[in-house]
Amino acid sequence: MSELLQFLFSGITVGAVYALVALGFTIIYNASDVVNFAQGEFVMLGGMITWFAHAQGLPLPLAALIAIAATAALGVAMNKLMIEPARGAPVVSLIIITIGASIFIQGAAQLVFDKQIHSFPAFSGDDPIRIGGATILPQSLWVIGGALVVFLALWLFFTRTLLGRAVLATSNNRLAAQLVGINTNFVMTLSFALSAAIGALAGVLATPITLTAYSVGIGFALKGFAGAMLGGMGNPKGALVGGFLIGLFEAMTAGYLSSQYKDAAAFIVILAVLFFMPQGLFGRKSTDRV
Amino acid sequence: MRLTPKSATLIVLALLVAITPFFFPSGYYYRVGALLFVNGIAVTGIVILTGYAGQISLGHAGFAGIGAYACALAPVHWGLHPALAAVLGAAISAVLAYLVGRPILRLKGYYLGVATLGFGILVSMVLNNERQLTRGPDGIEVADLGLREVLKGWGLNLTNGEFWYFFCGLCLIIGAWLALNLHNSPTGRALRALHGSEVAARTVGVDVARFKLQAFVISAVYASVAGSLLALQNKFITPDVAGFMHSVEMVTMAVLGGVGSVLGAIFGAGILTLLPQVLTVFAEYEQMVLGLVMLLVMIFLREGLLPSILKKFWGKDE
């Protein structure tokens, strides 16, 4: 029983990271219909920049803030320099553009920083907390709390603020949103900044547990995407639940089946979801427009 | 006489294979050339899938992995000749592509991309983890094809590099010829029709699901053969051949050069094969430059390099 609880804890912890990545995917997908394969690089940059700034002697909170701000700026630059000029390009091109961005950012990160594995101290110490025979790290609580707070903040933003509703309107119908006076370009910029900042936050929160290196991004991107798709593409609630579920599947696979194949869990889930319910858990049924 | 695109492509390829060796400063360039041709075979498959039929795959390296490991494993375990092992690999790839493709190809766009990506990653995971069979991430040696010795017996004495250069070149020309024939066949027309609009193709009686599946299976066989050739010429293979980055590389090569035509895609394969060779001096910047090339070409030359260049010179649409 304590074994199951332990796997549950580790599953929820990684699941929270995937949920954050999935939320980032969702925001950009809603605003622009682009699946951003560079989403994982935001997580990597969040961790790497924080480590770097902290190693230069800055206090950890300030380092984290710099990392999140810098990554958000990069997200805005990505939108302006890559996504906007490529508007209307076929899906294959968009996939290659965002994968190209991901490769470029990785290349730049290994030049600017290095190729080593890094970490920084956990926020509230490393003493594990005992619950019912299993243990959980205080940092895990930070990660899980972070995912829930971000989700709640997003929910409030999208349902309670004018700007948030403008984003939703843009994702529903870009032209119609423009016609009622919404600055859709600003909405796009905002979405990329928000998405990058959330990714970076995930990196900041998770790095004391998962460690970071220039190459960790693609794994996060794929798992996060799996989560977003499981929940139903474009649905924030789905992204949150999907991310946690992928984390749990992974932890259970590692615990009970084979730790070598834990990464397979996410993809088997993805394939199963695509076969049996392509719209995901919370997604809308889509129809083809001819 | 007016050249059809088909014969023009084949002539260009044949000239390329035959003439470039005269300009090689050293034997090493035969190796690079052979690698280019292998990549050319893989992207020709992508042209059929993406260029003709408009479907995406981010998992074709999985089939390359199957082709490569068939050549590594079948000769050892079943005493199969390496050439037959390559055929076996292609057959396994085809069957697998058929089984996986049936459910997957109902999906479109990103969903199809991710489903194929998942398939590719599962294959590479198996190759990495089943150590007692594949010896894991460190790789495994591959038996010699033995064709060079046969040729020697006939009085044709080639160095190893020369042999693989011309052999892969020949395979590429055959592969391109088949792909170009397909383009003009009823199947090719059906594929291009469903690329334009699946609904329109269906209304005129095209069995969309069947033709998509055909394109997927054919392109899987191309990837598998490319993987086999890579394994046989290196006499060694690692699971990286099936990795996600290799899948991305294949699609990038094809789209970079121009996925609409066989020659364009092979041109893209050439660029991305030569780029790392040129960049060895700047090894640290290699990844950045690769990413940048992908970005710039896709943003500014959407049809790919070759069509854009041709348009610039001749100022005409195809």
Image (cartoon, coloured by chain):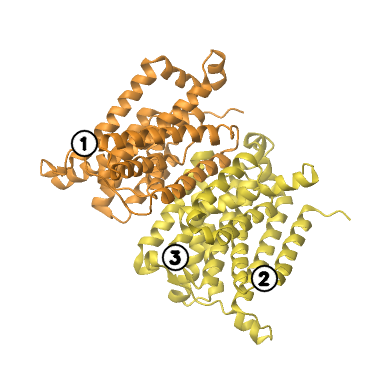
Residue B24's disc number:
2
Determine which quarter of the picture holds residue A14.
top left
- Element type at marker 2? loop
One can see residue A34 in this view? no
Q: Chain of mark 3?
A: B
Looking at the rendered image, the disc whose residue lies closer to the viewer, 2 or 1, is: 2
Provide the letter of the chain coloured yellow: B
- Element type at marker 1? helix
Task: Give the residue pinned by disc 1.
Answer: A141
Rounded to the nearest whole Å, what is the CA distance between mark 2 and mark 1? 61 Å
**What amino acid is found at the position of numbered circle 2 in the picture?**
Phe
Q: Which quadrant of the figure contains the N terminus of chain A?
A: top left
Left or right: residue B95 compared with residue A261: right
Looking at the rendered image, the disc whose residue lies closer to the viewer, 1 or 3, is: 1
Image x and y of residue A248, in percent: 28, 42
Determine which quarter of the picture holds residue A134.
top left
Closer-to-camera residue (B310/A235)? B310
Q: Chain of mark 2?
A: B
Task: Give the residue pinned by disc 3.
Answer: B238
Residue at left offset 78%, top offset 57%: B8
Closer-to-camera residue (B232/B102)? B232
